[in-house]
Image (cartoon, rainbow, N blue to C red):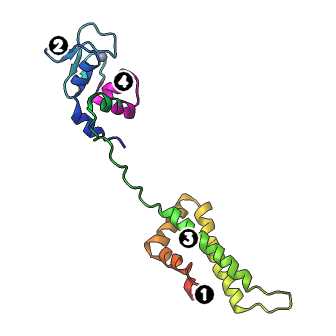
Amino acid sequence: MIDFKAIKGLVTAREAAEHYGLTVNSRGMAVCPFHDDHNPSMKLDERFHCFGCGEDGDVIDFTAKYFNLSLKEAAEKLLADFGNGVDLPYTPAPPKPPDPAKRCHDVLLALEVRLHHQKWGTAPQSMDDPITTEYAQNCQMYDFIAGLADLLSGGTAQQKEDEIAYLTEGGVLDRYEALLQKEVIEYADIF
Ligand SMILES: [Zn+2]
């Protein structure tokens, strides 16, 4: 990320304008390059301001407008033209805050897959087999977690927000994440 502030400390709007060919008179005024100007109506110092057309800004704004560049490109140009090889203007971009929605989604999905396998691993093998408590509980756990996962991907914005708050603020998600390390997820782990 370019450090715009450091660039503004490197060169004033007036210095840049003069370097790029504008004649600035003793009163700090120049003929404005941004409108059809005949008498100097642009004031240049740290920043610039045109009393004719109203253009106004700092050295980066000036350079961007003068050369028809984006602000980032203008900052890079100023660095190239005035930086003297100084290696200052790049600062690392701030780290992205962790996305709680993505973490909720990832954990729920992993848990859903785990419970799906666990559920089918205990399912009756034929019509004659009894439905065990274990299987019934696995079904309940699976349905519950799958429901949460579905709501997170298909619910309204408000529902998603509520669910993320429920999962993250109460430490529920941490608990769920820890369950992924267990061999068997038990009924009491979820309910
Ligand atoms: Zn002007």
Mark nearer the N terminus (3 vs 1)? 3
CA distance separating discs 1 and 4: 65 Å
Badge 4 marks a residue whose secondary structure is helix
Position of residue 135 measured from the top left corner of the image (x, y, whole percent): 71, 87
Residue 64 falls inside the magenta stretch = yes
Give the residue pinned by disc 4.
Answer: 65
Badge 3 marks a residue whose secondary structure is helix
- Circle on res. 25: 2
Amino acid type, residue under disc 2 in the picture: Asn
Amino acid type, residue under disc 3 in the picture: Val
Q: Nearer the viewer, residue 52 or 16?
A: 16
Amino acid type, residue under disc 4 in the picture: Lys
Query: Closer to the observer: label 3 or label 1?
Result: 3
Residue at the top extreme, as displayed? 38
CA distance separating discs 2 and 1: 83 Å
Give the residue pinned by disc 3.
Answer: 107
Residue 154 occupies quadrant: bottom right
Badge 2 marks a residue whose secondary structure is loop
CA distance separating discs 3 and 1: 18 Å
